[in-house]
Image (cartoon, coloured by chain):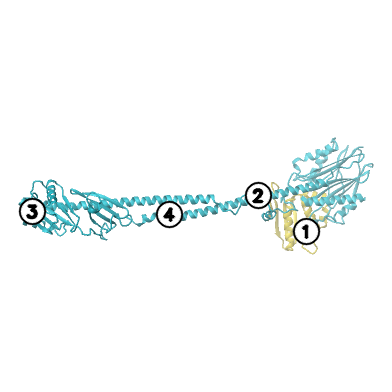
Amino acid sequence: MTEGALDSQPQFAIQESAEPTGRVHVAVSGELDLATVPVLEQRLDQLKAENRSVRLDLSAVEYMDSTGIRLLIQVLTGQDPAGPTVEVEDSFTPAVRRVIELVGADRLLAGA
Amino acid sequence: MSGVAEGVAPVEAERLEETGASRPTRDRHRWPFGAPLAVLVVGLTVTGILCWISSGLYTRNETRLLKLRAQDVGAVLTAALPSVQTPLASATALANATGGNVAKFEQFVAPYLHGNPFVSVSLWQVNATDRGPLAVVGAPPVLPPSTARARDFFARAAASSNLNIVGFLRRPPLRLGYAFTPTSSGSFAAYGESSLPSNRYAPVQNNSAFNDINYAFYLGRSAKPAELLIASVHRLPLTGRHATVTIPFGDTAFTVTVAARGPLAGTLPKRLPWAIAIAGILLTIAATLLTVVLVKRRQDAVGLAGELEQVADENRRLYAQERGIAQTLQHALLPDTLPQLPGLQISARYEPGVEGVEIGGDWYDVLALNDRRLLLVVGDVSGKGLQAAATMAALRFAIHAYAVEGQAPQTFLPKLSGLVNVSVDRQIATVLCAVIDIPSHEVSVTSAGHLPPILISDRGGEILEIPVGLPVGVDRNASYTSTTVSAAAGATLIVFTDGLVERRGENIDVGLERLRAQVSSNHASLDQLLTQLLSELGEHAPDDTAVAGIRWLN
């Protein structure tokens, strides 16, 4: 479990568990913004380099800024067909869901 | 927040030296002098003082012990007095009682011969010393009979109640002569002589209690060489530390000088000053070296702290420089002057975020397409810093180019994804384009992932509901649709970035509603309105914000 330290914001945390199929379940909580996105991004890059499939669960993310949206879009659209898959659970808090809609990225989720 | 600009790496100490930055004022490699020297001086001084004190104590102790030894010798001599005095007193009394009976005299004094303590005992008539002794037992006395010396001696002896002593020390045989008359009324006196070694030498026996000293005995009250009786050494005077006591003996005295043959108190106190000196010097050297190490370490730490501070200063300078560059870039890119078009009021603002050192990627643009049409653009590149500003510049100028050519936003927006790619650049940009036809009051809005504009009329503010296309940088084949609305006379259209409406912990719809409420029934001028909207944000805007608006004059 990796944690990022933010001043007074909800604590950013990444919790990982291995599924029976070998896929890694990555659950993120707290805020996904300029400070914390690099941490998650690094971890996803690492898992990709290890050829691990990922199921990304952002249901506990309470706030997402443009950097978070960027990462989400990147994950949803940047899949290498030859590489391990990253599946994003379509489960978000209402506030985050609204942001995704306003940015036009919800259609990317529907296709995923 | 990393706070590190994506384009510039922080400076490390090595690079600092490469660039020739000035060294810390205190040279790290100079050996420290002050404190170690002080420790050395103090250590040696203390050692020296302790040595001096212990040496002095040793000397005083030795002197004291020597004096005591001398007194011991004196006590021994004093104790010998009766062994000389008593036989002579008894023999004299016997002679006086027997009228000078020779046989009785000889019989009485016999045990005291052969050095016990006498070698010669003789009987004399006090008034007739010229005739010589009446009886002699043992060796003949060396006292010359018919001399004034003998006469005076016996006269003195008869008159005093002390043991009288006379010395024969000029030539061998060396003798001391004694006479003791208990009363002055007798006519006879017993006279004894003890002998001294002719070389006046008698070494101390090894098993004697006095084997730690050398001695010299003198007759009289001073150590005159002519009066030397006996000594334990051949060469006089005694060398080294010596003590002298004068022991009254009969009518004269013995002067005793003693000298120590070795340390009287044992060798340890003698060696102690040396031990102190060696230990003290070793400790001082150790302490000095330790001080050198500690001072040098502290110097190094101070030097390192200074270097680190220099590195920190350099980094601050670079950050400031980079922020300056980004700000300059942004300032250069954002339009200073807005186009003037008849029938329209135009205003715009850009407000950098209050948090962090880095510039955001928000921008606005107002392009006059011709004398009746205007393109209003607002955009937001993800991330911060120089990279965001650079991407923003690229997008802005591309939009310029396409718009000037006459391309519609839905045509050129997909092409912008040729400049930015989320997978490669790890950036996206949201863009809103509003084409305004001034005479017809028509507004054609196209959104690539961006928040819709707000249209203000007499009825109040209305967030336009428009379809939202994908942000720029996702899909080069993305399609965008434009929505056309008719604006009322005197209407206001405001485009903005999410900094204006977004707050953490709040659904963005709340912010949009707040904006709508703020602009409704607001009769300020367009400029004033924009200023108000931005000032309402206050401390809630960590993010940067761009806002642009147009108002029909009629």
Q: Under tag 3, what secondary structure?
A: helix
Q: Under tag 2, what secondary structure?
A: helix
At label 3, the amino acid type is: Arg
Q: Tell me the CA gap for discs 3 and 2.
A: 118 Å
Q: Is residue A111 above or below residue B372?
A: below
Q: Which of the two residues, B471 or B18, is positioned nearer the viewer here? A: B18
Total labels: the figure holds 4
Question: Residue B439, how many percent across, how many down?
Answer: 94, 41
Q: Which residue is mark 3?
A: B131
Q: Chain of mark 3?
A: B
Q: Under tag 4, what secondary structure?
A: helix
Q: Disc 3 vs disc 2: which is toward the camera? A: 3
Q: Tell me the CA gap for discs 4 and 3.
A: 73 Å
Q: Disc 2 vs disc 4: which is toward the camera? A: 4
Q: Tell me the CA gap for discs 4 and 1.
A: 83 Å
Contact between marks 3 and 2 (CB within 8 A): the answer is no
Tell me: B143 left or right of B4: left
Does label 2 lie on the same chain as label 1?
A: no
Does label 2 lie on the same chain as label 3?
A: yes
Q: Residues within 10 Å of mark 2 (few under 14, many from 20)?
A: few
Q: Earlier in the sequence, mark 2 or mark 4?
A: 4
Q: Chain of mark 1?
A: A
Q: Disc 4 vs disc 3: which is toward the camera? A: 3
The part of the image, by quadrant, that contains residue A39 is bottom right
Furthest residue in direction top, as rendered: B523
Tell me: B44 left or right of B399: left
Does label 1 lie on the same chain as label 4?
A: no
